[in-house]
Image (spheres, coloured by chain):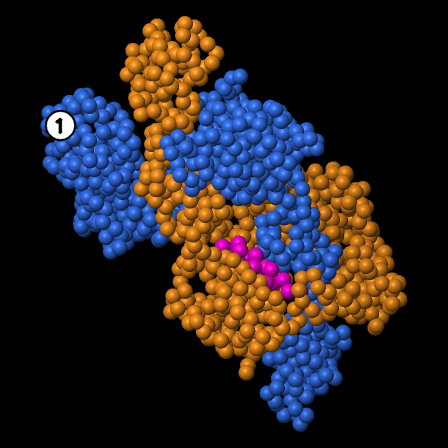
Chain colours: A orange, B blue
Amino acid sequence: MTVYLHDIPLIDAQTRFYEALDKFKLRGVLKTEIIDLNENLIGRVLAKPIWARISSPHYHASAMDGFALKSEDIQNAMPTNPVILRVDEQTIYVDTGDPVPDWANCVMPIENTEALNSDGEIVSNIRDPYAIRIRGALTPWSHIRPMGEDIVATELVLPANRKLIPVDLGAIAAAGLTQVEVVKKPIVSILPTGTELVKVGEKIKRGDIIEYNSIVLAAQIINWGGEAVRHPITKDNLDELCAQVISAAERSDLVLINAGSSAGSEDFSSRVIEKLGEVYVHGVAVRPGHPVILGMIFLENKRQVPIIGVPGYPVSAALTGEIFVKPLIHEWSGNERQGQETIEAELTRKITSPAGDDDYVRVVTAKVGDRILAAPLSRGAGVITSMVRSDGYAIIPRGIQGKEAGDKLTVILNKNKQIIKDTLLVIGSHDLTLDLLAEFLSLKGKRLVSANVGSLGGLISLNRGESHFSGSHLFDPGDGTFNSSYVEKYVTNFKALIIPWVYREQGLIIQKRNPKNISSLEDLVRQDIRYINRQRGAGTRILLDYYLEKSGLDSSQIEGYEQEEFTHLNVAAAIKSGRADTGLGITAAARALDLDFIPLYHERYDLIVPETIYQSEIFEPIKLAMKDEEFRSRVQLLEGYDASCMGTELVQSFYSDRRKNA
Amino acid sequence: MTVYLHDIPLIDAQTRFYEALDKFKLRGVLKTEIIDLNENLIGRVLAKPIWARISSPHYHASAMDGFALKSEDIQNAMPTNPVILRVDEQTIYVDTGDPVPDWANCVMPIENTEALNSDGEIVSNIRDPYAIRIRGALTPWSHIRPMGEDIVATELVLPANRKLIPVDLGAIAAAGLTQVEVVKKPIVSILPTGTELVKVGEKIKRGDIIEYNSIVLAAQIINWGGEAVRHPITKDNLDELCAQVISAAERSDLVLINAGSSAGSEDFSSRVIEKLGEVYVHGVAVRPGHPVILGMIFLENKRQVPIIGVPGYPVSAALTGEIFVKPLIHEWSGNERQGQETIEAELTRKITSPAGDDDYVRVVTAKVGDRILAAPLSRGAGVITSMVRSDGYAIIPRGIQGKEAGDKLTVILNKNKQIIKDTLLVIGSHDLTLDLLAEFLSLKGKRLVSANVGSLGGLISLNRGESHFSGSHLFDPGDGTFNSSYVEKYVTNFKALIIPWVYREQGLIIQKRNPKNISSLEDLVRQDIRYINRQRGAGTRILLDYYLEKSGLDSSQIEGYEQEEFTHLNVAAAIKSGRADTGLGITAAARALDLDFIPLYHERYDLIVPETIYQSEIFEPIKLAMKDEEFRSRVQLLEGYDASCMGTELVQSFYSDRRKNA
């Protein structure tokens, strides 16, 4: 028994799996069903064409409110030569939609008639007078909707494979049908397995993994046109798992076993499939997602049910859904021809890919100036927020080891293209107020996407035109200012503005009740203190290095100086978890995780924005935020924050023409 | 009491209505509700932001299957200098996802370890050996997913107003939540009213109207994010209707009264609203859709419920949904920011619009060569198939009396843009085999859209590059051929091919059992015979005119010669309904409607296709159809059809350079 996988290329895996599906005639539309027109049929796919049983209208119908008559009777009517017709003898009143009597061949609109009494006087009872006076002729069939105007009986109303939209249901009813044969939604059973899994809502302890893959997979399946059946969690017990798989297979078109992320669980999956059927593929060279199993269960009633072993990591699980489950559901449910929206975008930074894998890179997209940009998100298979934040993915195919910044990518979108226009991309230093800003902007129909690369990285990106603005808190030891000298040095391609945003406190985040008795920067070089640092280029790290030097401390003496985190909250989390004793960060991050805090410095965090963007429509909602009382007070309420400087004065950067001309 | 409406411009109607909504605080998101994560939450909109309650991972988790250990213990390990660690003393085995013990700070992947027994020999029990041998060092925190790698407790996971996608549910669960507060779907009640209405499935008689507007409106409402409640049909009884409206309003956020199309019914609607509340607008200058009523019901419990009187004509009803109901549901359900996909397209033919109305023109779209074309569909408010067939609509604003062929239009699409590429547009003469072809193509993922303008109109359109191909059966009396001489004359801009398609019988369609005793063309000039003709340019009409002349008959003596229909089936329908006694047409149309038929002539119906299109990918599925046994035999089975010539030889048209150079 070996737990190591032999990954085969995606295309080979698909070929093996589809050969088996072909063999067992599990291709194309699987089943159909008859559904009543009164049920919700929207999005369902017609299994058969709809031929009209009756015409619509099914009789000659008046197209107006008026009087049905014979056109011959009024053929000489003129303003100066009116014709009078006796109601109920030569003409009758008809409402719109009423049948036109056989003897009539046109309808005079009521507004073109004069209602008369038996004395020839005009009366107000316009619908049921004694007679009417008409002062103009009509050609035959005027103002009549002839039988079959809309639909002629026997005509094709809708072709097979039509995905039904609301008005279709009207046309089907008009054509005389009361029910339709549509493709049955394939049933997919999802079996979460693993002793470490616990249900959503249960109390969790260390080592427990909240089982939510089945929720995500079920939602995906419903979205793609299938029906999802979630099974309870099965512990890692081979017999129990076999029994569950058989019971699921008996009532499904496809079974997904979602192993816990441990090798043991996954191994159970492949043993179950081998015992109940056949494993075709164990391990596919896609990233993330390697340990996918593709197989078939053979039931006693001779039915074959495909089964997929879905990896436990959440990103791998969701992506396995995308790659293997979605095409099957689309094919089986007749939804094949939907096509996914794609967009060409420019990669914002270099990415490396394993040469042997098809690499699915999650990205966020935004339009900055005239360029559509794709910023890659975290690559970790465990980072589900990378999927939550993503606008889609790009596939770096096998054999390619990566892409350079500026390379064009085809992004397969999971959102409407519209959102790209409504996105503000901020790259730079992370601050908690950006979350509040994101929330504010979402109420204005805009989306704020932030990539946290530190202050310096943010300025460099901004200068390359890769973001709408940047958040920065870079202290200049030379002149004691924040950001100005850095903007002058690093933002050279255009005129940028510095918008003062907040003052905030920086200090040492420490364990609750300060068990290690830390009181100042000097304590960091103590042998019993483990530090957690921010990444190179982060304003907080520059601040640390400045004060270390000022205090004559040697960073090589600090244990953990090389351990890097990318946000204040992650630094706090590292301390909270006991991985480190302290780290430099902001008050709010310490408070958020109920840690203690030793205030050391005040600093200003600014927004840096190109002047052209500052003056464009896309930046308007941020100007609104800066003036919004509620927004400012929410920022002010964050501990250690002072929002009084927000937007008060615009510091213009020193855009130097010599650089432009250089 | 007057039944005439005073239409006001759409913008004024909306202003009046929204002023009332503002006044009664019925703007923005109406209500929220708490939903469990296990329910179907896809597409629901978050009412509140999601802040993480716990971190994910919520402990330091192993990222690999391997051995947890202290990095210090192996800092000197090298291939030539292995280090041996005692299992359970210096190291323990961990599966992926397992917690890393507090004393450990890294995980050595299992594939980089050698499992040993107590004698120092390599053993196969790789997970629980006596000791392991390691030949390389690790930096601290290698192969560990630190607590909070994905989500840090207190962090913003999702902003308010987020429309949930499947992976969001995973992130919400990972953040420690079990339920979410989402915007409640607004409830819309639909009340069909009108004595002439009958339920789908009920037996219908002349004058009955099948009530399907409520099915279409309900489906629209569900599609837009609302909940629909369909009420039974109310007859035109004021008291009953008032009671129904009150009961509906009590449990809804919006009430729709869908009047039968008669003025009487509609009048009831406005009286009901006046009695129970206030009418703000009665009549809106949009086409189709005029008699819209916008009002408010005042309930005894002081609640105000907006009410819309929806016109009875199906196209008007569905469009009233689009214009008035959709924005309300979007706003109330928090779905506002979706934006509809649009495309710029070239109008294929001139359309006229009433200057006083915003005119909603339904169109089908297709890409022919490099041009995106929009072909306008039937303008009738009763023609629901115009909505079924449409890809969306263009709005011709008030004050503009129409558009010329070739003018650019912005089409608001109701389908994915993708479909435009997959559409074959055939303009020309209608033939029943085009319905069979449409069905065949839909199985190949293509869509056939046909506009019936007759053979000659089809050739003229084709020559203007407005269709992919044309169907034509134009007889040349001069040389007895079909189509060739016409193609030579009318298709001058490029080289076109004539593809023989079918032979079919033309003759007189007559009433069952021939009550008027018609036997030949000569009977058409009899005084007691009413004829129904095809439109100018139709091959059938040209055929008729040729034989009339040949027989020395005068068309002005034929009663009904000026009455035109656009398809064979519509001619048959006119005869079936008794509107006419006979018309020239094809056998299959007569049989379809169970009419009798007097065969007179044989003719060939051909497809005319530009050579470039014939050779392009888009035409491939038609070539497949011509070779497909099943398709050919289905055509052959149509009475009066002979498919033996289908695709047998390509007759090349006489593309003349002199025309090109002229």
Q: Quadrant of residue B168?
A: bottom right
Q: Residue furthest bottom?
A: B119
Question: Quick one: A442 or A352, which is closer to the camera?
Answer: A442
Place of residue A104 in the rendered image (x, y in percent of width and height, measured from the top left): 32, 22
Disc 1 designates what residue? B522
Q: Position of residue A546 (x, y in %)?
A: 80, 59
Q: Residue at x 16, y 23 (%)?
A: B526
Quadrant in the picture for residue B246 = top right
Left or right of A629: which side holds B501?
left
Total tally of numbered discs in the picture: 1
Chain to which mark 1 belongs: B
User: Is disc 1 placed on a helix, strand or loop?
Assistant: helix
Residue appearing at x 38%, y 19% in the figure: A92
Q: What percent of the width, then of the height, locates residue B310?
A: 52, 31
Locate the N terminus of chain A and report the quarter of the image it occupies. bottom right
In front of the other: A106 or B57: A106
How many residues crowd around disc 1 within 10 Å: few (fewer than 14), some, or many (20 or more)?
few
Specify the segment rendered in magenta.
A209-225
- Looking at the image, is A345 positioned above or below residue A74? below
Residue at screen point 58% across, 75% down: A240
Q: Is residue B410 visible?
A: no
Q: Is residue A601 magenta?
A: no
Query: What residue type is disc 1 on?
Result: Glu
Q: Relative to A661, say whether B56 is above or below.
A: below
Which residue corresponds to the image point at 66% horizontal and 54% vertical from the top-left?
Answer: B36
Front residue of this view, candidates A23 and B274: B274
Left or right: residue B203 compared with residue A522: left
What's the magenta bit mostly, secondary-structure-wise? Answer: helix
Q: Is residue B86 visible?
A: yes
